[in-house]
Image: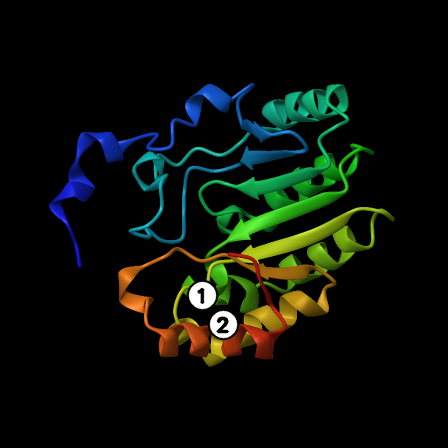
Amino acid sequence: MPDLQELNDDLASDSLHEIKYHDIPGIQYKYGDQINLLVTSTCAAICRYCFRKNLLHNGSAITATEMAKVREWLEAHPNVKSVVVTGGEPLILSTSKLNAILTTLQKVESVEHIRISAKICSFNPYRILDDPGLLKMLRERCQARLGNTIWIGNHFSHPKEFTDSSREAVRLLKATGVGMLNNKGRLGADAGPVTWSERTVSLARLRAVLSG
């Protein structure tokens, strides 16, 4: 149930004290071999469990100049093997913008894994269904460099999010060659074992690996 504590100032911004991990604009460096790359402050949804929800919707997106600096930073930190492209919602960006981001990351030889963290399949699957150019671009990026893999980390939190449209969006994305994961917020509303089981079965049918 909603709680007034959600409006508490302590939860309003940077609830996990992440600002201190921002080396340069866009990069959040919290782990030894992985960074978060914040590419947009706009999201497809405002999830109640999101710890960045009050930092979203000012409309900003990472620039080409900032991406050039991200590449320089990554080349200076070859220990970083994994980049989580997040925000905000990366798939809300235009296909050309997303292509430029992925292309830049793939030019860094030490980057082996790119994971796009996305709510869009469950919230607005028509972003995938109505843009064949997005699927073509992802297919090309998946084939662009041997030794570099692209994953999409979906956010299916409840069985009711598995509509015909969202299932088709996942199927089309998988056909491009991207790997599929699923992350989930822990919500009291779906704590029951039956609901949890239904969601897990739905993910298994889509061959989307459960990662959280």
Q: According to the image, label 2 marks what residue?
A: 166
Q: Nearer the viewer, residue 149 or 105?
A: 149
Q: Disc 1 on helix, strand or loop?
A: helix
Q: Disc 2 on helix, strand or loop?
A: helix
At 56% across and 57% down in the image, what residue appears?
A: 211
What distance separates the C-alpha of mark 2 from that of mark 1? Answer: 6 Å
* Colour approach in the figure: rainbow
Amino acid of disc 1: Ser
State how many labels appear. Answer: 2
Q: Nearer the viewer, residue 77 or 164?
A: 77
- Asked which quadrant contains residue 107, the reply is top right
- Give the number of the disc on residue 51: none
Residue 39 image point, x, y percent: 53, 36
Q: According to the image, label 1 marks what residue?
A: 122
- Asked which quadrant contains residue 78, the reply is top right
Q: Nearer the viewer, residue 69 or 190?
A: 190
Residue 187 image point, x, y percent: 32, 59
Report whether 162 appears left or right of 4. right
In the displayed structure, 113 sits above or below 154; it is: above
Q: Residues within 10 Å of mark 1 (few under 14, many from 20)?
A: many
At 25% across and 33% down in the image, what residue appears?
A: 12
Amino acid of disc 2: Ser
The residue furthest left is 4
At 32% across and 72% down in the image, what residue appears?
A: 192
In the displayed structure, 126 sits above or below 107; it is: below
Report whether 164 appears left or right of 101. left
The residue furthest right is 146
Point out the tag, 2 or 1, that comes first from the N-terminus: 1
Residue 70 image point, x, y percent: 65, 25
